[in-house]
Every structure is written in C-alpha cells, then in structure tokens.
Image (tube, coloured by chain):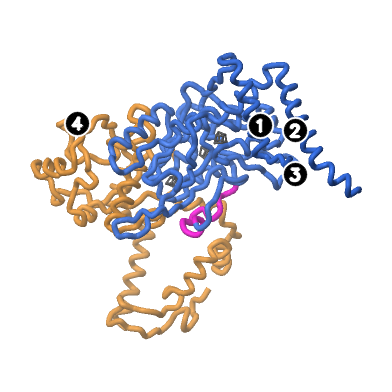
Amino acid sequence: MQLSRRSFFKIMGAAGASVTALPPSANAWKSKAPPDPYGCLVDLTRCVGCRKCEEACAEVNGLPTPERPNCQCIVFDKKRRPDDKAYTVVNRYFTGKLDQFDKPLPTYAKVQCMHCQDPACVSACIVGALTKDETGAVRYDATKCIGCRYCMVACPFEIPAYEYHDPITPRVIKCSFCYDRISKKGGLPGCATICPTEALTFGKRETIVKVAQKRLEENPGKYIDHVYGEKEVGGTSWLYISSVPFEKVNLPVLSDKPSPKLSETIQHSLFSYLWSPLALFGVLGALMYKSNKNQGEPENKGGY
Amino acid sequence: MIKKIIVFAGLILLTAALCTAEIWKAPDQEKAKERAKEVVPFIKEYKDDCQITRRMSLIDAGISIKNVQDVYFLLDSPVIKKREDHYEPVRFAHKRHAALTKDCTKCHHFRPKDENALETTRCSACHQDSFNPDHPERIGLKAAYHQQCMKCHQEEAKGPVDCKGCHLRNVPDHKNLVKLPDNADPFQVTAECLRCHDTQAEDMLKTAHWLWKGPSPYTTGHRKDIMHGKGTTALNNY
Ligand code: SF4
Ligand code: SF4
Ligand code: SF4
C-alpha cells in the first residue's frame, strides 16, 4: 500500500475526530487572547510607499539599514518578505486600478507580524519561547528557543524568519510590535511614528477596529467593506483596510477560526486519555505492517 | 569694462558690510520660524460642513483669496519634532498656493464649532499629536500636511509628491565628521569635502560653475564668450 502524506493525515484526522467526539465539553478550547491589547491599522489607501517605516523599524530595533532606503522604484520590482534582516517590508502591487489620467495606480502594502490574538506560532512553540503579551505583542525569547522552527511552519502569514547564516546562536526573527516602546506609557511603534501620511494608526485594538469601521462607513465606495484581521484567524492586532481585494496584496483568505483551536483540540483530546497513545500507535503499527508487507516481498526476491 | 569694475567694487563693499554689520536675516523667514514654534490650543469640536456649504459660508463672510495676508509659512511644529526629526521643514508659499487654487476650502476644509473662532484657522489648531486616544479618528499634524499636499499635487498633476521635492534632509552636524589640520590649505579642504561628497563633485564638474561655459540664457545679450575660468585659463583651479 502506497501511503501518501495526505492519506496519512486523513486517517490521523479521523482518529482525532473520533476521539474528540467522545468528550463533548471536557476539553473545550479556550482563547488565551489578552482582553485589551494594542492594535495598529494599516490603511492601504493612504500608504504612499515611501518605505520610511522600514527605515524607522531598522533604526529603533538595531537592524541593518534597509536595502536602498530612499529607493521607491527598483526595490519594488521584486516582491519581498520580512527576513532575518528586516522585521517589515513594503511591497508594491499593480491591481488594475487606474488614476484619473488612466495611469496604473500602485497599491503599497506593508508586511509584518500580525500579532494574532491566538497566535499559531505561540501554540506551536514547544518550549514557550514565543508568548502573547498583555500589550498584544507576540514576544520572542531567544534564550528559550531551541531552533526547531515549528513557529515558521505554523504561522498562517509566513512571518517568522531564521538566521540561517549564524551557526552558533541563530534566532527567529520577526516584528516585536516594538514591545519595549509600546509597553511604556505613550510609547509608539517606530513604524507608526514615522509614517508621514498616518497610513499606520496605532492605539487600543478595540478603538482601532472602530476607527476602521468608521472610515469604511464614512467613505462609501472607497474601501472594500471588510476590516482584514478583525476576525481572520480569530483576530489579529494588526488590521488592514484597502480599496483593492486583499488577496491581490498578498493578504490570504483565511478562516475566522484561530489556527491553534484545531491543532490544540486534537492534541489535547488525544493525550488526555491514557489509551489514546496506545490507539494511535496501534493504528500506526498496523499501517506499517501492512505497507511493509506489500513492499517487502519483491525486494526480498531481488536479494541485497 | 567699466561696468565690470563697478560691479566688482560693489561686491567688495557688500562683503565688507556683511563682515562688519550683523548678518542680515530675511524678515519673513524669521517670522515664519517664530510662528512655526507656536503651539495653539487644541480645537476639539469642528463644524461638519460639506465643501459646498463651506464655500458658501466663506463667501457670506466676505473671505476670498484677496484677504490672504500671510505670504509664507514654514510647515513645522514642536508637535512633530517631539516624535521625530529627520527632515528640514517644508517652506510653504501660502499666498501663491491660494492664488493658484483660488479656493480656500481646499485646505481650510472645516471650521471650529465655536462661532467666535476665526473662519480659517491654522492647520495645527485641529491637527496636533497623532493617535490621540480622545480623538482617534483625527489625524495628526504631520499626516494632515502630507495627505493634503500629496493628494492635491497628485490630482492636479502639479507639484512634488516625493520626499525630496519638498524637504531637505537634516544636515548632520559636520563638527565631528570633518577632519582637518589647523590652518589647512585650500587643497586639503577640497580633498576633505571630496572624501564623502564624490557624487556631488562629479555633478559639479558638469556645471557652468566649473566649466564657465554652457547655455547662458540670463546673461546680457546671451553672451557666450569666455574670458577666464576653470574651463579656460585654470587660474583658480583647485
Ligand atoms: S502573524 Fe505569525 S508570527 Fe505573527 S503572531 Fe501570528 S502566527 Fe505568530
Ligand atoms: S511594530 Fe516595531 S518591530 Fe514591528 S514593524 Fe513596526 S517598527 Fe518594526
Ligand atoms: S511609512 Fe507609511 S506611507 Fe510610508 S511606506 Fe510605510 S506605511 Fe506606507
């Protein structure tokens, strides 16, 4: 039997589901989101692609100066991702919008960690190196990190980067939400402080959501009627509003369910019963036996 | 020839006067600087009129571009400087912009709710610090300037929309950057400048300041003859 990765997960899922079905409420998943976090709204209609946020981020976080900091042309030719040298990058998209002179109108979009309310990265981290703080910041503690990079796989926005070049003390790199600044009274993230057009609005998440909704209401027809991040993956601290569809600026369509909900429910339910690992290994053993038997025979015939 | 001598003598006299007297300052620049330092009381409530109503009320109040008194502003404020300070403030020709747009409401888009307040208040009365939790939807002064200027420049396809079109970068303090011996000679000074400013030097070599030749649309009779200069006699070529 050829057991593909996909069918393996199917069987596992079924096993998980059957176990979950047994205890209806004992393991009900609970959100661990902080009650009153900060948030930041990115209004793509206001962003002018000046990349000052990249420069300011590098400055306040002691990162290397961004590539061609004053360039607003060739840097945009390729799509960039936040990497081990930059917590945030701005990309340019031509989405088919035209200005009043029929010239293609660019849309610029800043990318950084979304600081999810129920972060998949925190849930995936097995040593607690990533934590969700009261301020809303998802913080990283390099001293705890063992470099397994599960967070990178888990993040629905593909944000965490890794210092592959550093053989001794490689770290996971991602936007810190300027924790050191925003945790002080009146502190602002570096990027939001510098943004010349206030394309970035910082404040309490609750207020920011209202500001976003008000902006949509007061400018009918200007925006897509959706606040990205209000509900996506259970809500994120960084929110986006835009006049072009979000998929076109690389903000993926995601379910409203927090990603940890599914994975944690399966994990917790599986391991909360003593017999469940036995059942799991039983299933695995049976599968292995079957697949070995199928594969084994012709090989034996050939002889080593 | 006589003309030239007179001009020369005039120049020498002027330099002498400058050295002895206090340095002359442009009065409108000084006034603009003082004004930019002021922080006025924050206007919390504004009258939410549409632009047409706004235009009508300005006409009713008898206010038009003829009333513009302030010629020139420096778009600067301690409110902005408090947060960051990377660029020189923009010099804004207020009267000229008024004359070009012929519409005060383009910038003076709302008025304070208080009936006794001025019909056209300054930007920094309503727009101050960003992200004010009491007025979360009110944009800060820096954003107000940028959104207003850039939007209009884009729509009118006139005026700069890039950073350096309006701003100069803050000049870093050269005290610690320049390294020269005491009583340095001119060659040493030039070499020291060139240490960092080689692109500017390259550009300079192509200009009339270096070549002493090139198009001369502003000289008397569009004269093109070159008598002296770096491109010809190399008298003062260092
Ligand atoms: S965006 Fe990714 S890295 Fe950031 S908090 Fe969410 S899951 Fe974690
Ligand atoms: S919040 Fe701070 S760390 Fe994150 S992108 Fe902005 S400046 Fe960089
Ligand atoms: S600083 Fe503001 S306007 Fe400039 S690129 Fe960043 S988000 Fe856009």
Subunit of label 1:
A
Q: Are marks 2 and 3 in contact (CB under 8 Å)?
A: no
State which tag comes first along the sequence, 2 or 3. Answer: 3
Q: CA distance from mark 4 to mark 3?
A: 63 Å
Colour displayed for chain B in the image of the structure: orange
Colour displayed for chain A in the image of the structure: blue
The residue drawn where x is 31% and y is 58% is B159
Subunit of label 3:
A
Q: Is residue B64 above or below residue B226?
A: above
Q: Which residue is mark 3?
A: A167
The residue drawn where x is 28% and y is 47% is B31
Q: Of discs 4 and 3, which sits in the foreground?
A: 3
Task: Kindly identify the amino acid type of the residue bearing the numbered disc 2.
Answer: Leu
Task: Kindly identify the amino acid type of the residue bearing the numbered disc 4.
Answer: Lys
Q: Which mark is residue B113?
A: 4
Subunit of label 2:
A
Q: Which residue is mark 2?
A: A287
Task: Kindly identify the amino acid type of the residue bearing the numbered disc 1.
Answer: Ile
